[in-house]
Amino acid sequence: MPAERTPYIAGNWKLWGTRAQAADYCERLLTLLPDSTRRRPEVGLCVPYTALETVSGALEGSGVVVAAQNMHQAESGAYTGEISAPMLLEVGATAVVLGHSERRQLFGETDRALSEKVPAALEAGLQPILCVGETEEEREAGDMERKLRHQVQEGLEQVADDRLADVVIAYEPIWAIGTGKVATPDQAQEATSFVRALVGDRSKDAAERVRVLYGGSVKPDNAGEILEQADIDGALVGGASLDPDSFARIVAAAE
Ligand code: PGA
């Protein structure tokens, strides 16, 4: 990846982390990460809503980005069970994962909703991490590009060209998430470069600057070969982020 793009390693805790667990985790992680002045990859943690305040407090001044795992596009309204951007900001989040495949597959998240969530996050001052990726059947049927095109175009549809590079895009093939079946470096490079080209259809400048991450069974022992691919600017790490030691080793692989 070109030096202008700062690598980014984000851990996605998914449904893990009481506040007590979160506090212990952060304390340990801070002993393992290089301090923020020497840290080259940007590091983020995507944590449950209830842990946001604990994590942002524990990591204050460390430069680690604290992200939520979802958000509603409206600021307030009759949307029982939802959380808005101002609520996230108030508890210290500065980023938000949008369109994770588990939200799409298990909870009915749609590209239509994402086309509103991504600009809403940006306008509120949150860094959106937009997740895209194909299923195994789609890949086998030769439908990967069609699927990615649809997800990227619709997710970014209402983002102005000059804000496109403020979105972080995570390419996460669904067949590689939580399965131990990691995409080969070539497969990951091919798909992330396609995602970058899709951004390039909107703005060449944004395509140069936008960060595209890979996610799906990233572990300390495979992170290096994935991160050295030309169009891969970092990783979204699920399972291996739950252990601060293995997460810190993945961060070290991006240095
Ligand atoms: P995994 O999850 O690293 O456990 O495969 C990645 C993700 O869902 O973001």
Image: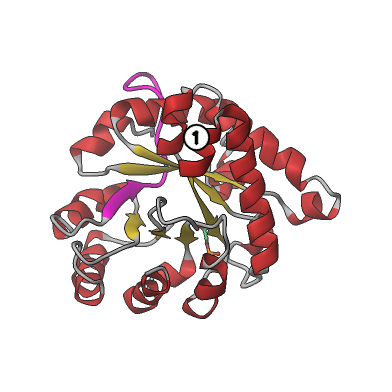
For the point 61% across and 51% down, the residue is: 192
Say whether residue 77 is magenta. Answer: yes
The percent position of residue 250, horizontal first and vertical second, equals: 42, 72
Q: Is residue 80 visible?
A: no
The percent position of residue 76, horizontal first and vertical second, equals: 32, 21
The residue positioned farthest toward the top in the image shown: 77
For the point 56% across and 41% down, the residue is: 107
Front position in the image: 89 or 226: 226
Tell me if 188 is positioned left or right of 228 in this view.
right
Front position in the image: 1 or 217: 1
Which residue does the numbered mark 1 point to in the structure image? 205
The percent position of residue 21, horizontal first and vertical second, equals: 26, 67
For the point 15% across and 60% down, the residue is: 58
Front position in the image: 90 or 166: 166
Numbered range of the magenta stretch: 65-81
Q: Is mark 1 within 8 Å of ligand 1?
A: no
Instruction: Characterize the local packing of mark 1: few (<14), some (14-19) or many (20 or more) Cα atoms within 10 angstroms.
Output: some
The percent position of residue 159, horizontal first and vertical second, equals: 47, 25
**Where the C terminus falls, by quadrant?**
bottom left
Q: Secondary structure at mark 1?
A: helix
Q: How many marks?
A: 1
The residue positioned farthest toward the right in the image shown: 141
Look at label 1 and name its amino acid.
Asp
- Predominant secondary structure in magenta? loop
Q: Is residue 218 visible?
A: yes
The chosen color scheme is: secondary structure
Tell me if 86 is positioned left or right of 57 in this view.
right
